[in-house]
Image (spheres, grey):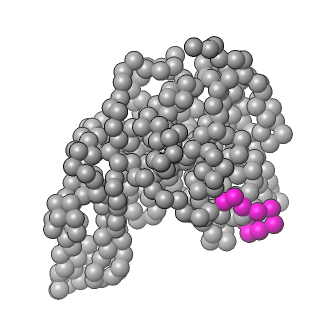
């Protein structure tokens, strides 16, 4: 095997980070009403030896906080002197939304539908352009961290283009309980980065404005495993399964009447066709409706607000071939067994990254 070459300085935003060093770069994106500069903090860990450039980003939606903690934890674990390649870590992309605890930007646009952006467009377009042109296009691989939207929660899962060999290999290394071979949406970071030939994993786990320790722990482990698989960190002797629990399709089960919902299944549950998912009734209890599972599947997303309107998406079900369903349930059981609780310190299954 050829020995890795010495790394070069990594330039971002007019700042050069020398090999074997770490630096915080404030990427200028806008000004507040007070003319106070607003910046995106970008942490660059440039390894001593040559290798991939991995971007780990979070809070493209400003109220999705789990990824912020994931990035913080990873930065405490990785040392640039022991790294091959470069880690570009961005805990908060949507700084406007993060300040306001909002998914959106001040103009109510969704940043993750605004890439690659424009220098002369809306706030969302300008922010997307700055981030995409100065950060995304400098990277060779991307892990983008998300949660469900407000009043919903997601089981830890990956969305990726599994027809792309590099994306598939990253997903295999990550080791999430559920992997969805998902199509991209126009204007999303994943769609536009893939169009540039950059493999992207989108991680979903937990809910907005809350820390979910199980989802955080899974994402930390998954990111470290991907870094190992890319050769950025030393590999582990312990081997992982060669198969992924890939969902063949997913669908949302929606409310068929207004009222108060009483869920009968938990996130991560395996349900049979016709199983009772929830009961919906008016506040006085009249006209109770029973919501049934249309097919056998696993609950990977769930509405968390007890009040529902007709048509609300309540349960997100993933459908598997039997073998993949068994694999998914084994990983889901392990995930809940390993949940460290509400604390801030997470076990990444190793004493160090040497």
From the viewer's perspective, is 23 left or right of 232? right
From the viewer's perspective, is 202 left or right of 43? left
Q: Is residue 330 above or below residue 288?
A: above
Residue at position x 22%, y 69% in the image: 294
Residue at position x 36%, y 24% in the image: 239
Residue at position x 47%, y 21% in the image: 235
Q: Quadrant of residue 38?
A: bottom right
Q: Is residue 191 above or below residue 86?
A: below
**Residue 94 position within the rendered picture, expressed as x and y whole percent measured from the top left:** 64, 56
**Residue 72 position within the rendered picture, expressed as x and y whole percent measured from the top left:** 56, 37
What is the count of numbered marks? 0
Q: Quadrant of the N terminus?
A: top right
Q: In this view, does 317 lie above or below 25?
A: below
Q: How would you classify the magenta stretch by its main secondary structure?
A: loop
Residue range (magenta): 115-123
Q: In this view, does 285 lie above or below 130?
A: below
**Residue 331 position within the rendered picture, expressed as x and y whole percent measured from the top left:** 29, 40
């Amino acid at each position: 095997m050829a020995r890795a070459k010495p790394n070069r300085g990594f330039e971002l935003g007019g700042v050069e980070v020398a090999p074997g060093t770490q630096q915080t770069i404030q990427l200028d994106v806008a000004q507040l009403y007070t003319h106070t500069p607003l910046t995106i903090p970008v942490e660059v860990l440039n390894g001593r030896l040559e290798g991939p450039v991995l971007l780990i980003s979070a809070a493209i939606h400003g109220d999705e906080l789990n990824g912020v903690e994931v990035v913080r934890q990873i930065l405490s674990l990785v040392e640039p002197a022991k790294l091959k390649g470069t880690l570009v870590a961005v805990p908060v992309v949507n700084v406007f939304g993060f300040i306001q605890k909002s998914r959106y930007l001040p103009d109510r646009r969704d940043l993750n539908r605004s890439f690659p952006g424009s220098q002369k467009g809306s706030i969302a377009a300008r922010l997307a352009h700055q981030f995409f042109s100065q950060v995304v296009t400098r990277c060779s691989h991307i892990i983008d961290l998300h949660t469900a939207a407000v009043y919903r929660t997601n089981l830890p899962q990956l969305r990726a283009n599994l027809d792309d060999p590099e994306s598939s290999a990253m997903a295999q290394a990550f080791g999430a309980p559920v992997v969805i071979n998902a199509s991209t949406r126009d204007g999303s970071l994943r769609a536009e980065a893939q169009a540039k030939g950059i493999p992207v994993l989108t991680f979903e786990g937990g809910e907005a404005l809350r820390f979910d320790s199980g989802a955080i722990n899974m994402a930390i482990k998954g990111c470290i495993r991907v870094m190992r698989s890319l050769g950025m960190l030393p590999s582990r002797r312990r081997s992982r399964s060669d198969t992924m629990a890939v969902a063949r399709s997913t669908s949302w089960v929606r409310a068929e009447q207004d009222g108060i919902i009483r869920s009968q299944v938990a996130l991560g549950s395996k349900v049979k066709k016709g199983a009772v998912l929830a009961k919906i009734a008016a506040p006085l209890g009249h006209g109770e409706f029973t919501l049934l599972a249309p097919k056998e599947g696993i609950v990977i997303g769930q509405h968390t607000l007890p009040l529902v309107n007709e048509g609300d998406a309540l349960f997100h079900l993933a459908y598997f071939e039997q073998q993949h369903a068994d694999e998914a349930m084994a990983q889901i059981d392990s995930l809940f067994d390993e949940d460290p609780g509400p604390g801030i310190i997470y076990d990444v299954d190793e004493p160090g990254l040497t």
